[in-house]
Image (cartoon, rainbow, N blue to C red):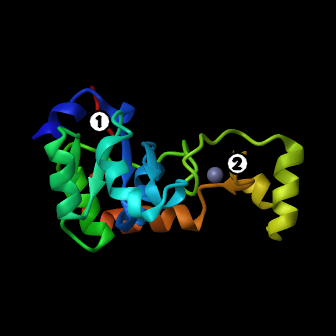
Amino acid sequence: MLLKILTRGGGWTLKFICDRMLGKLAKWLRIAGYDTLYVGDLPVEIELEDDILASNFNDRILLTKDKELYKKAKSVNRNVFLIKSNEVGNQLKEVESTGVRFIPVMDRCSVCNEFLRIPAESEKWEVLKKEGIENDLAEEYELWYCEHCKKLYWKGSHWENMIKFLQKHSINLRKINK
Ligand SMILES: [Zn+2]
């Protein structure tokens, strides 16, 4: 399988673009640290979407649920993978079967795909105040920041729920020892 060959040793350098039906999958790929675009976030006219996905963003693997788009992309030798399941947990399994790993990392913003960084003190307090988040959160947890979304991330209950979701779907969370 093409994707299998690509992921062997390629690891987290893989980049993806997801079609309009795969917004949740795009978020999970970002949570796992993969550079992932979602076509719904791009300034693309809906009528032109399939053509653009089939023939542009060639440095990215196209993930699609649309058989017609899959065929179209294949016909121009586009690197494409057809997702069959409607349920995101099963979609993760499908993608995992190609060698992609879904171990959560604090690397990218799941909303916009930008890299996260440690917030400056002023940025941290600004978001905590704006969101009405308890100040002791900043003492309890390590925080990460998306400059673009002005959003903070931390490994709290949301993080634990993500891990539980992945475990429920038997996603392999063991780190690879190379
Ligand atoms: Zn963001």
Which of the 4 quarters of the picture holds residue 4? top left
Q: Residue at position x 84%, y 48% from top?
A: 123
| Res 122 label | none
**With respect to residue 73, does 165 lie above or below?**
below
**With respect to residue 39, does 114 lie above or below?**
above
Q: Can residue 120 be spotted in the picture?
A: yes
**With respect to residue 78, does 83 lie above or below?**
below
Q: Secondary structure at mark 2?
A: loop
Residue 171 appears at what percent x and percent y? Answer: 27, 57
- Residue 60 shown left or right of residue 97 in the figure: right
**10 Å neighbourhood of mark 2: few (<14), some, or many (≥20)?**
few
For disc 2, the marked residue is 148
Q: Is mark 2 within 8 Å of ligand 1?
A: yes
Q: Residue at position x 24%, y 67% from top?
A: 90
Tell us which disc is closer to us: 2 or 1. 2
- The disc, 2 or 1, on the residue closer to the chain's N-terminal end is 2
- Residue 73 shown left or right of residue 34 in the figure: left
Q: Secondary structure at mark 1?
A: loop
Residue 60 appears at what percent x and percent y? Answer: 35, 39
Disc 2 to disc 1, how far (Cα)? 31 Å
Residue 128 appears at what percent x and percent y? Answer: 82, 61
| Label 2–label 1 contact, CB within 8 A | no
Comparing 68 with 36, the one in front is 68
Q: Amino acid at mark 2?
A: His
Q: Residue at position x 44%, y 64% from top?
A: 46
Q: Is mark 1 within 8 Å of ligand 1?
A: no
The quadrant in which the C terminus is found is top left
For disc 1, the marked residue is 176
Q: Amino acid at mark 1?
A: Ile
Q: Residue at position x 85%, y 65% from top?
A: 130
